[in-house]
Image (cartoon, helix red, strand yellow):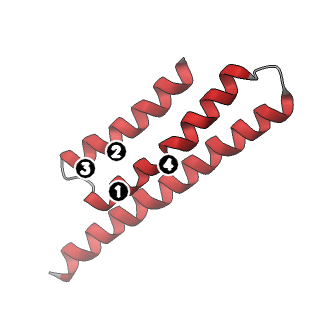
Amino acid sequence: MLYYLLIGLGFVSIILNIVLENLSIFAAISLVFVFFGLKAGRILRKCYNEKEKLVESSKLTIAMHNFVSIVVVLAYLSEKATISYR
């Protein structure tokens, strides 16, 4: 399903940037939020005709994006603060 592919590529991008040391290891905490995406994908697959369930799926996707963004930004800022402190 395209939804899973897009979510997966986003998390692969985070992992790749951790490996390439563009992001600190702190960004790996964002991988916990992949479960929001998996649950949203299951809802999309099973309940694609139920409006209330689709709203729940959208909420999960938005929450996942918000939480991952906050963690990645904090990881980036903590890395910059560590470098400037040295």
Residue 18: mark: 3
- Residue drawn 56% across the image and 47% down it: 64
Mark 2 surroundings within 10 Å by alpha-carbon count, few (fewer than 14), some (14 through 19), many (20 or more): many
Q: Secondary structure at mark 3?
A: helix
Which residue carries the number 4 mark? 33
Whole-angstrom CA distance, mark 4 to mark 1, is 11 Å
**Label whose residue precedes the other's in the sequence (3 or 4):** 3
Can you give x and y, in whole percent of width and height, for residue 66 in the image? 57, 53
Q: Are marks 1 and 2 in contact (CB under 8 Å)?
A: yes
Residue 49: mark: none
Quadrant of the snapshot with the C terminus: bottom left
Q: Are marks 3 and 2 in contact (CB under 8 Å)?
A: yes
Which residue carries the number 2 mark? 14
Q: Amino acid at mark 1?
A: Ala
Whole-angstrom CA distance, mark 3 to mark 2, is 6 Å
- Residue drawn 70% across the image and 38% down it: 58
The answer to which of 79 and 49 lies nearer the viewer is 49
